[in-house]
Image: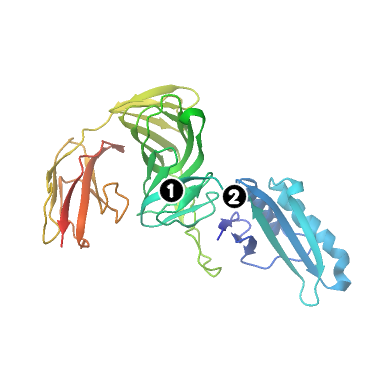
Amino acid sequence: MFLLWMMASSEASCEIRLINGKVWVDQPWSVSSDLSSSTQSCLTHLGEQLSHIPGFRDLTLSVALPPQEQHRALEVAEAYLGTVAQGGVPREQLSYFLSKSSQQPYISMSYTIRTSDVLVAAVGGISGEVNYGDSELSLIPLTLGQQLPMGSVVEVGAEGVVNVYLAEGSVVHIGSDSLVRISKVHLIEEDERLVELELIRGEIQTHVVSDPVGSFKIHTPLGVADVLGTRFRITVNEEDKKSLAPYSPIQSLEQLGKVPQKNSGDKIVRVETYEGRVRFSNGLSSVDVQSGLFSESRTKKDSVDLGRLPRTPNILSPLKGGFLQTPPLMWASSHRKCSYVVELAQDASFSIGYRRYDTVSTQLQLNDILPGGFWFWRVACVSKGVYSDWSQVYGFELP
């Protein structure tokens, strides 16, 4: 199933959804060549969105009028498609079909999108709400073991995580509230790789397979990270202002509601290197982020700042063993201005049964009732938004 949603500007006050090749709106289209301002705005917005969807092929407008009104059908079609074209869709990608209707006149639209058949990644672990599609506007549920074609966008919900294994051997851990595009994954001659990811928002952590002659790049809104190391984290955060945020995938057309709001002011891009080296460039300046350092780039600032990562916490207890109930999790303080992030999961890659806790203390007593079985856990220090490396991973078992 392919699904896409979009909402026109507040002036148009109409919602448009694309589901399995059909365009749906929350109100009837007017069968008239004299378009209202709201219809014009809605159609222009539709054109803008379609022009940015990778693989968009064409849009077909169907106009059905009673026999005695057939002379108006061509005028209506030209008015509709001309307005969509103003949104940025080339006129040659727009067509119409005119027919006669013995009942009420109507207008409908259908579209086609070219999808890649080159599978370049697979889901190795997943927890919470995770969706994928052909663009950041297309969202359908992602499942464990599913393979992803080149060009896929992966969106992770507020409490989700996913591990994506690329065909060249690297692992990408996508954190909660993140949106990532798998732009390119190529294996060239003699196993030389060409990988390009786009971090639109949120956070990714990667373990990159060493390749001295290949290329592994991560594009962000403020620059490009050229990966020369093996383990690092990149985050894209937004501050202050409000903007429209994506819907969750809909299950039916009746689920039309208000679009939630999400912070999207000035952007901050951080690169934290735990092993190896990452070169970050914003087009005006470039820095090498060595192991143990982080870089920070901000909107409206030409330079890229460098700093040292916080110290990694040392876990005290539990290190191993079985317990009748969840034991308190304890670690040694690593920095006087630290808060801490504690992660638990039922796999050592922290993608199955994933749980995250934030605290300013050096111990955590969980109120959650964890299912029986073996649980892995780790902790990191966070100082002014910068993460230390993760502690060693330890575990405990519950009945």
Q: Nearer the viewer, residue 109 or 140?
A: 140
Residue 72 falls in image quadrant: bottom right
Q: How many marks?
A: 2
Residue at the disc numbered 2: 115
| Residue 177 in view, yes or no | no
Q: Nearer the viewer, residue 129 or 285?
A: 129
- Determine whether 176 is above or below 169 in the image: below
Q: Measuring 16% from the left and 46% from the top, which residue is drawn there?
A: 361
Which mark, residue 122? 1
Q: Measuring 76% from the left and 47% from the top, which residue is drawn there?
A: 92
Q: Position of residue 211 (x, y in %)?
A: 41, 28
In the visual, does 65 lie left or right of 18? right
Residue type, label 1? Ala
Kind of element beneath mark 1: strand
Quadrant that contains the C terminus:
bottom left
- Determine whether 228 is above or below 48 in the image: above
